[in-house]
Amino acid sequence: MASLRDIKNRINSTKSTQKITSAMEMVSASKLNKAEQNAKKFVPYMEKIQEVVASIAGGNTGADHPMLQSRPVKKTGYIVITSDRGLAGPYNSNVLRALYQKVQKEHSSKDEYTVLPIGKIGREFCKKNGLPIVKDVTGLPDQPDFAEIKEIASYAVKLFADGEIDELHIFYNHFISAISQEVTQKKVLPLTDIDTEGKNLTSYEYEPEEEEILKTLLPQYAESIVYGALLDGKASEHASRMTAMRSATDNAGELIDDLTLSYNRARQAAITQEISEISAGAAALE
């Protein structure tokens, strides 16, 4: 049985941990509020650029572009969005599991795919499991700007444009609420499934020609999909970390209660033992 001193030390240690996890929960809650606002503010931009792309590409203009055309898939690119730090519950493990299962199911050779991880956890996972990495980015801030991921997004689009990959998919955690995030896989390229159902597309007059506009607009649209997924993923990361820290704080409280009960019982047993020894000593002297 643990001594009173050992139990007391464990109680003090657990209380210290509880203070840390409680502070981390509050920090994540503050970051979540900002990240959620960023994700929501980006939605109108995405909807508008999607409308313009759909109007040009889906209209009766005869406009055409390689990024709008499917081709035989010889090699696939995967962008996976994770965090740089742990302590975020199942945030990283869920999305990495989905990526790994997709790779195992769809590909029999490493020559058939390549991975572009965003986040240190994803990069280390790919290295550990032998997934081929063509480019990665780490050290992103909690509220990233587009400029900070433009390089990898542009690089991924260029891989497709140059024919080095024939499809580009992205894996990330979609933010639903503070307690719910959903692993999502989205095809970024080719842009063959732009959703226009139920939307009244605006008719535009173009200068220069539609093809020239598409050359600039389509890469920007694909890059915006990546950035939107990153903002969504960041909100999910902070939400998952906040929930994990709240759970850790609650668990620490339960452990402190159990340890306190054990401490009181041990203390009571020690006092009872001392009383018994004193009584026995007094009886021996009579």
Image (cartoon, grey):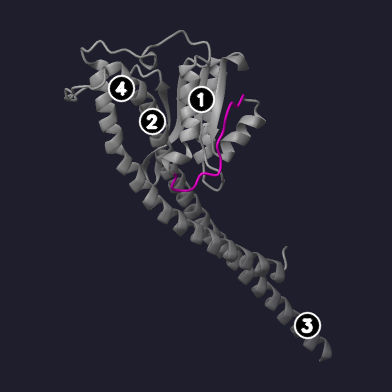
Which mark is nearer the camera, 1 or 2?
Answer: 2
Query: Where does label 3 land, which residue?
Result: 280
Query: Where does label 4 land, which residue?
Result: 213
In the rendered view of the protein, which quadrant contains the N terminus? bottom right
Crowd around label 1: few <14 · some 14–19 · many ≥20 (10 Å): many
The tag earlier along the polypeptide, 1 or 3, is 1
Query: Where does label 2 land, which residue?
Result: 225
The percent position of residue 259, horizontal first and vertical second, equals 61, 64
The residues tagged by marks 4 and 3 sit, at their Cα atoms, a distance apart of 99 Å
The tag earlier along the polypeptide, 1 or 2, is 1
The residues tagged by marks 4 and 2 sit, at their Cα atoms, a distance apart of 18 Å
Residue 253 vertical placement versus 188 (above, below)? below
Relative to 212, 141 lies left or right: right
Query: Where does label 1 land, which residue?
Result: 78
Which mark is nearer the camera, 1 or 3?
Answer: 1
Residue drawn 53% across the image and 16% down it: 164
Crowd around label 3: few <14 · some 14–19 · many ≥20 (10 Å): few
